[in-house]
Image (cartoon, rainbow, N blue to C red):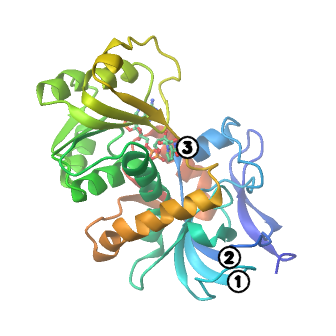
Amino acid sequence: MSAETMKAVIAEDGQPLKLADVARPSLKPGEVLVKVAASGLNRADLVQRKGAYPPPPGASSIMGLEISGTVVETGEGTARFAPGDRVAGLLAGGGYAEYCAVDEGSLLPVPDGMSWQDAACFPEALMTVWANVFDRVGFKSGEAFLCHGGTSGIGVMAIQMTKLAGASKIFATAGTDEKCALIRDLGGDRAINYKTEDFEAIVRDEGSVDVTLDMVGGDYIQKNISVSRPDGRIINIAYMNGFTAEVNFAPVLMKRLTLAATTLRARPVDEKRRIRDAVEKDFWPHVVSGKIRPVLEKAFPASEAEAAQALMGQGGHSGKIVLTW
Ligand SMILES: NC(=O)c1ccc[n+]([C@@H]2O[C@H](COP(=O)([O-])OP(=O)(O)OC[C@H]3O[C@@H](n4cnc5c(N)ncnc54)[C@H](OP(=O)(O)O)[C@@H]3O)[C@@H](O)[C@H]2O)c1
């Protein structure tokens, strides 16, 4: 099967995205071949396209970090999934294509009745939030949580997951009143329009927080420190407003804060399997029951990938944008 071709979304320097024929991926031990039905977009794809987030060694150079679809072939050493199984999975690359090779440990089983578009909304966001908020900085029931980018693909899952995990109060920031309404609808207690309100003053006045999930960085670094309770933890998954800032670390010392940051993409497959296992045990049942819902802004045919990425680049969307095959 590896000598056969498939359609994939290709980015050529300065050109609009287009479909082209490329070789289907061959399987490494532990991988299965998935016929892709829907591919989730992630902001990282836009960064990769600009050349600033190259795929880790060994990963496909095609964009795309998550897919849903049907297993069509299983590689050496796989045990769990079989041809015909419906799956959704996390990738280090290669998701904008008709077929992709996925480590079996990065796949979640998709129940009958869940649409492919919905299924593609979950893997990257669920696994990123679990790996960072729950695993790396140990969010616990009864704690207060602040989520920046509250209606990003990541944020809409972070709000629902921390709500289910027993957050005492969820603050989330977003750039419009419509996005703030969605935050409340998803279970956020205090939605803050950061363009018209001062999140630092509001969170401090309303009790501060134990855990902050941030992707903004820049001047938010000091403000996140300011709104943290003693023993608080701040986890950064990106620094969209800048990697550098002049920071007063005195409150970090005095409040015994933890500042952390991680990426998911380049982690070894065994680590991703551990993350998948935890997500499948703790949160996937809530996805299957409908308690955690997908937020889908729009699905585009794969041939319109350029328009799909342009929509994400404009930043007006809420939740996920997907490509369908
Ligand atoms: N470290 C990891 O492993 C990991 C994994 C997944 C994602 N991420 C990162 O997490 C972030 C969210 O990813 P996503 O795919 O969910 O993105 P997304 O859906 O495109 O959401 C990003 C949102 O962040 C808000 N925002 C705030 N400041 C911004 C700025 N300076 N530039 C652009 N947007 C800004 C925007 O909404 P407003 O209107 O509210 O401003 C925007 O819609 C990205 O930075 C991504 O790279 C990291």
Return the residue nearer the eye: 128 or 18: 128
Q: Is mark 3 within 8 Å of ligand 1?
A: yes
Circle 1: is it few (<14), some (14-19), or many (20+) Cα within 10 Å? some
| Crowd tier of the residue under label 3, counting other residues whose Cα lies within 10 Å: few below 14, some 14–19, many 20 or above | few
Kindly check if marks 2 and 1 are in contact, taking CB atoms under 8 A apart as contact.
yes
Q: Secondary structure at mark 2?
A: strand
Q: Is residue 15 left or right of residue 68?
A: right
Q: Nearer the viewer, residue 67 or 316?
A: 67
Please state the horizontal and vertical placement of residue 257, each as a whole percent of the image: 34, 27
Label for residue 73? 1
The residue depicted at 23 percent of the width and 42 percent of the height is: 180
Residue 29 shown left or right of residue 213 in the figure: right
Q: Position of residue 246 (x, y in %)?
A: 45, 10
| Quarter residue 53 falls in | top right
**Residue extending furthest left?**
206
Residue at mark 2: C-beta within 8 A of ligand 1:
no
Residue 113 position by quadrant: bottom left
- Callout 3: SS: loop
Tell me which amino acid carries mark 3. Thr
At x 69% / y 47%, what residue is drawn? 16
- What residue is shown with label 3? 263
Residue 32 has which mark?
A: 2
Q: Disc 1 residue type?
A: Glu
